[in-house]
């Protein structure tokens, strides 16, 4: 199974993914590219939400529940 499909399956199961999550779980070095491929294929993945914690800012991708 490809990294893009792994990311899609995780998002469809309600997982919230960061860049680090994608690297550790799926070996994906460029999850933004995989997310863009999924969006072009018609999957409703909203833009990443950004959070700040301990002075570091990071984005989280998640899918709406109805997808």
Image (cartoon, helix red, strand yellow):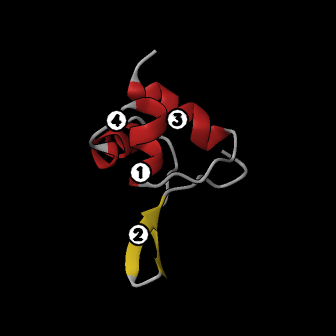
Q: Residue furthest front?
A: 54
How far across and how far down the image is residue 3, in percent? 40, 27
Q: Nearer the viewer, mark 3 or mark 1?
A: 1
Spot occupied by residue 55 in the image (x, y as percentages of width and height): 40, 85
The residue sitting at 42% across, 66% down in the picture is 59
Q: Position of residue 10 (x, y in %)?
A: 59, 37
Q: Residue at x 48, y 47 (%)?
A: 21
Give coordinates of residue 49: x percent, y percent: 48, 70
Q: Earlier in the sequence, mark 1 or mark 4?
A: 1
Asked if the residue under mark 3 is in contact with the one under mark 2, i.e. CB atoms within 8 Å, the reply is no
For the residues bearing labels 1 and 2, Cβ distance under 8 angstroms: yes
Say what secondary structure mark 3 lies in: helix
Q: Which residue is tagged 3? A: 8
Instruction: State the residue position of label 2.
Output: 58
Quadrant where the C terminus sits is: top right
Tell me the CA gap for discs 2 and 4: 16 Å
Name the secondary structure under disc 1: helix
Query: 40 left or right of 54?
Result: left
Above or below — where is 44 with respect to 60?
Answer: above
Q: Is residue 47 visible?
A: no
Residue drawn at x 59%, y 43% is: 11
- Given the current orientation, which residue lies at the most extreme top position? 1
């Amino acid at each position: 199974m490809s990294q893009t499909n792994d990311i899609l399956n995780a998002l469809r199961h309600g997982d919230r993914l960061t860049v680090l999550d994608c690297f550790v779980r799926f070996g994906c070095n460029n999850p933004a590219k995989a997310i863009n491929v999924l969006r072009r294929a018609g999957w409703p993945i909203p833009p990443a939400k950004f959070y700040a914690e301990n002075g570091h800012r990071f984005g989280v991708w998640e899918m709406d529940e109805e997808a």
